[in-house]
C-alpha cells in the first residue's frame, strides 16, 4: 500500500526524496520504495524518518483498520 | 616456464583482476560507512540467486561431463566460467535492485572502470593469442580462454548498468 502520508509530509517540508534519503542515511531508491509501498522499513528507519519530518510514528506509519 | 607454472600465473592474474574489481567497487568515495537496510536485503537475495546459479551450473557441468560424456572445457576453466557466471548474476541483480551502489558513490567511476576492465581482459587475451597460445587443448577449452570469458561476462553487467542509470535518471526527473 502506498504511503501517501510520508510523501505529503516530505513535500510539506519541500524536501526531495534525495534530501530525505541523505538526512536518514539511506539511498533515494529506498525512500521511493517506502512511498510506493514496495518496502516495509524497520522501526529504526521509521523513527529516523519521523525525526527528520517532525512527525510521529502514528502520523506517518500507522494503518487504521478499514 | 612449465605448463603448470603458466596456469598458476594466469589464475593469479585473474584473481588479481577480480580483487582489484571488488576493491574499487566496494570503495566508498566519502569514507563514511553507510547502512541501507533495503540494500542489504536485496543484496542477500542476489547472493542467493548467484549461489543457485552456481549450483545449477556445476550440476549441469557434471551431468554433461559424466552422464552425456559431452566435454567442452577442462575442470579449471569450467570452474572459473561458473564463477564468472555467478558473479555476473550477482552484479546484475544488485544493479537492478540498486543494492550495489550506495547513494554517495559516483556512477561515473563504474562507467569508466568496467570498460577498462573489459579492455584489459581483451588485451591479455590478445597477447596470449599473439604468443601463439591456443585456447583449446585436445578440443577442450583451456584456461587461456578465461580472459575472453571475463571480458564477455562484463558486457551484460555494463548494459544493465547503463540501462539502470538512465532509468534512475528518468525516475529522478519525474520525482
Image: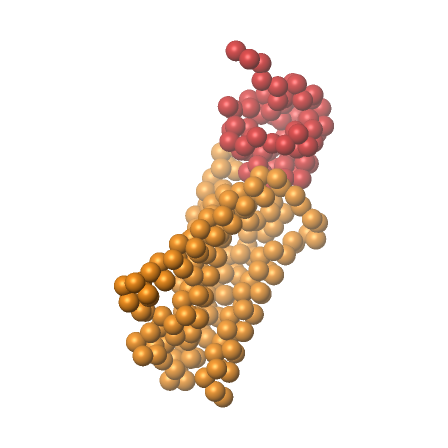
Residue farthest bottom in this picture: B1
State how the image is colored: by chain
- Left or right side of B31 for B45: left
Give x and y (percent) for residue B134: 36, 80
Name which residue lies at 62% across and 22% down: A61
Camera-side residue of A9 and B149:
B149
Residue farthest front in this picture: B67
Name which residue lies at 41% across and 70% down: B75
Residue B155: quarter of image: bottom left
Give x and y (percent) for residue B159: 42, 53
Camera-side residue of A42 and B168:
A42
Residue A52: quarter of image: top right
In this orientation, does residue B111 appear?
Answer: yes
Q: Look at the image and give the colour of chain A.
A: red
B175 up-or-down from B107: above or below: above
Q: Look at the image and give the colour of chain B.
A: orange
Name which residue lies at 31% across and 79% down: B138
Name which residue lies at 42% across and 80% down: B128
Residue farthest top in this picture: A66
B30 up-or-down from B69: above or below: above
B155 up-or-down from B171: above or below: below
Number of numbered markers: 0
Give x and y (percent) for residue B24: 59, 60
Camera-side residue of B55 and B14:
B55
B156 up-or-down from B34: above or below: below
Give x and y (percent) for residue B66: 32, 65
In this orientation, does residue B122 appear?
Answer: no
Amino acid at each position: 500500500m502506498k504511503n501517501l502520508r510520508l510523501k505529503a509530509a516530505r513535500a510539506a517540508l519541500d524536501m526531495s526524496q534525495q534530501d530525505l534519503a541523505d538526512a536518514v542515511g539511506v539511498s533515494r531508491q529506498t525512500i521511493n520504495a517506502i512511498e510506493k509501498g514496495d518496502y516495509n522499513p524497520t522501526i529504526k528507519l521509521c523513527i529516523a524518518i519521523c525525526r527528520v519530518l517532525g512527525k510521529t510514528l502514528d502520523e506517518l506509519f500507522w494503518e487504521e483498520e478499514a | 616456464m612449465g605448463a603448470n607454472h603458466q596456469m598458476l600465473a594466469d589464475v593469479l592474474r585473474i584473481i588479481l583482476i577480480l580483487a582489484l574489481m571488488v576493491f574499487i567497487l566496494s570503495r566508498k568515495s566519502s569514507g563514511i560507512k553507510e547502512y541501507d537496510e533495503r540494500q542489504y536485503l536485496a543484496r542477500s537475495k542476489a547472493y542467493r540467486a548467484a549461489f543457485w546459479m552456481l549450483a545449477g551450473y556445476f550440476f549441469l557441468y557434471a551431468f554433461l561431463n559424466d552422464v552425456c560424456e559431452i566435454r567442452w572445457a577442462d575442470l579449471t576453466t569450467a570452474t572459473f566460467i561458473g564463477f564468472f557466471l555467478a558473479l555476473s548474476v550477482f552484479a546484475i541483480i544488485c544493479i537492478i535492485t540498486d543494492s550495489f551502489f550506495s547513494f554517495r558513490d559516483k556512477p561515473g567511476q563504474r562507467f569508466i572502470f568496467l570498460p577498462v576492465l573489459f579492455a584489459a581482459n581483451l588485451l591479455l587475451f590478445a597477447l596470449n593469442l599473439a604468443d601463439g597460445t591456443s585456447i583449446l587443448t585436445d578440443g577442450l577449452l583451456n584456461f587461456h580462454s578465461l580472459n575472453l570469458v571475463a571480458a564477455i561476462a562484463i558486457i551484460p553487467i555494463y548494459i544493465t548498468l547503463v540501462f539502470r542509470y538512465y532509468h534512475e535518471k528518468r525516475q529522478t526527473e519525474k520525482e
